[in-house]
């Protein structure tokens, strides 16, 4: 089943990698992991958890959208080996090699996609320029991190910071906006502004929407550069405004009826959290690292798992779940909110900081474990229709 639908293989792997990346915090607090896991945690969550879900989703969806041959089993297996391999190297403290394997993974994934783009029978949604921007952000970001780890190769501090922002945030934020503009209207019963008539030529409407997506990608990249140059407040404000404006234009959920179901509720929480987190960072730039976890925990991680749930149900023959009350999603959302509040508040409790890091991690792990036990097994069930 992983032939043609790589999510069936990559989503379980990504879940496991995410649990490993989060578990480093309680293990460190309990003196069971010797090294402070700040950088290692970030690398595993981005190059492991996030990357497997992005590649699993795009590898499944893009061939269908372009009407091209689907991924082969060997292609799915290749990414299922490389991504955990990168994480294993990071865990073994071979950071340079881990980043190198991740860069190789991104280049191979780009090559596999470009082969299909060349033989496409339809154009991709114009918002997918943001997806391409996210992949390029990761490629440039991890390349800069690799150069910074080479002995005697000294990079300017702003360039190292810029690369880190491209990898940690650009790789996630840009695809979220690009995929979201096309995919999220289905959740809310809204018309899809990215769904254009099938064509291999670029219509004026396609070009207009592509120009908007490209402008959004450029402004977000400028916000990363401004942050790297220490214009923090302006960078965070620009990021929050650009993201909110683009999503409200392409997915005007404020105009949607009150759509039922737990998936929609989880999605609303996630979509609200990302601009909220960046907005709080703009207002309180000295506490930006704390509020960044609003973006990552209740924003990106809940969004990834909610959309993954929709993909799993849609490909296992359970469309009735889209608008159903699902207790695993309710538990997941509640525990992720608890994890976020605990992690953000930890930085105002210096004597209890690492204890709160651990409690936040445990809440996230428990929520994801419930999700993995109840929803993830459906990746084994093919859609009979």
Image: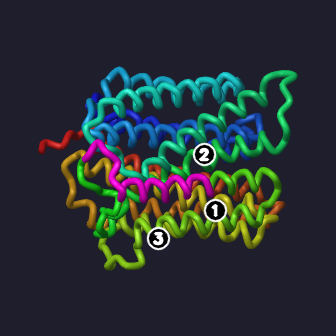
Q: Quadrant of the N terminus?
A: top left
**Residue underneath mark 3:** 248
Total marks in image: 3
Q: Compare marks 3 and 1 and give the one earlier in the sequence.
A: 1
Count residues near mark 3 (Cα–Cα under 10 Å), then give few for <14, some for 14-19, many for 20+: some
Instruction: Give the residue displayed 61% in from the left and 38% down from the top.
Output: 44
Question: Distance between the Cα atoms at labels 2 and 3?
Answer: 32 Å
| Residue 104 position (above or below residue 293) | above
**Label pair 2/3, CB-CB below 8 angstroms:** no
Instruction: Give the residue displayed 71% in from the left and 36% down from the top.
Output: 33
**Label pair 1/2, CB-CB below 8 angstroms:** no
Q: Compare marks 1 and 2 and give the one earlier in the sequence.
A: 2
**Residue underneath mark 2:** 22
Q: Taken as a whole, is the magenta stretch helix, strand or loop?
A: helix
Magenta residue check for 154: no
**Residue underneath mark 1:** 239
- SS state under label 2: helix
Count residues near mark 1 (Cα–Cα under 10 Å), then give few for <14, some for 14-19, many for 20+: many
Question: Which callout, 1 or 2, points to the residue nearer the camera?
Answer: 1
Instruction: Give the residue displayed 81% in from the left and 45% down from the top.
Output: 158
Question: Along the horizontal axis of the image, is 204 left or right of 42?
Answer: left
Q: In the drawing, what numbered circle is on residue 325?
A: none
| Residue 382 position (above or below residue 186) | above
- SS state under label 3: helix
| Residue 63 position (above or below residue 239) | above
Q: Which residues are magenta?
A: 199-219
Along the line of sight, which residue is nearer the eye, 107 or 219? 219
């Amino acid at each position: 089943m992983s032939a043609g639908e790589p999510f069936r293989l990559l989503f379980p792997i990504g879940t496991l990698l995410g649990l490993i990346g989060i578990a480093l915090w309680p293990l460190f607090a309990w003196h069971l992991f010797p090294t402070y896991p700040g950088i290692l945690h970030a690398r595993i969550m981005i190059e492991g958890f996030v990357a497997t879900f992005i590649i699993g989703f795009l590898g499944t969806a893009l061939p269908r959208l372009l009407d091209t041959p689907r991924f082969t089993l060997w292609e799915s297996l290749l990414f299922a080996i490389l991504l955990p391999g990168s994480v294993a190297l990071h865990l073994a403290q071979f950071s340079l090699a881990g980043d190198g394997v991740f860069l190789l993974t991104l280049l191979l994934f780009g090559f596999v996609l470009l082969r299909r783009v060349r033989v496409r029978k339809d154009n991709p949604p114009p918002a997918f320029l943001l997806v391409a921007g996210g992949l390029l952000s990761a490629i440039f970001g991890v390349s800069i991190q690799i150069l910074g780890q080479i002995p005697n190769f000294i990079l300017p501090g702003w360039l190292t910071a810029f690369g880190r922002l491209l990898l940690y945030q650009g790789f996630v934020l840009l695809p979220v906006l690009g995929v979201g503009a096309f995919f999220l209207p289905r959740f809310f019963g809204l018309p899809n502004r990215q769904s254009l008539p099938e064509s291999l030529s670029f219509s004026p409407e396609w070009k207009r929407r592509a120009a908007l997506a490209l402008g959004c990608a450029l402004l977000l990249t400028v916000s990363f550069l401004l942050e790297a140059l220490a214009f923090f407040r302006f960078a965070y404000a620009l990021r929050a405004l650009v993201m909110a404006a683009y999503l409200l234009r392409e997915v005007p959920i404020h105009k949607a009826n009150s759509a039922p179901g737990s998936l929609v509720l989880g999605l609303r929480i996630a979509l609200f959290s990302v601009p909220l987190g960046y907005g709080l960072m703009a207002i309180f730039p000295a506490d930006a690292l704390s509020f960044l976890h609003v973006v990552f925990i209740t924003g990106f991680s809940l969004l990834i798992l909610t959309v993954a749930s929709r993909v799993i149900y849609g490909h296992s023959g359970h469309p009735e779940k889209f608008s159903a009350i699902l207790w695993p999603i309710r538990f997941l959302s509640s525990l992720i909110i608890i994890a976020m509040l605990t992690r953000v508040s930890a930085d105002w409790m210096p004597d209890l900081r690492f204890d709160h890091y651990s409690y936040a991690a445990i809440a996230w792990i428990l929520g994801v474990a419930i999700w993995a036990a109840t929803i993830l097994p459906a990746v084994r069930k093919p859609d009979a229709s």
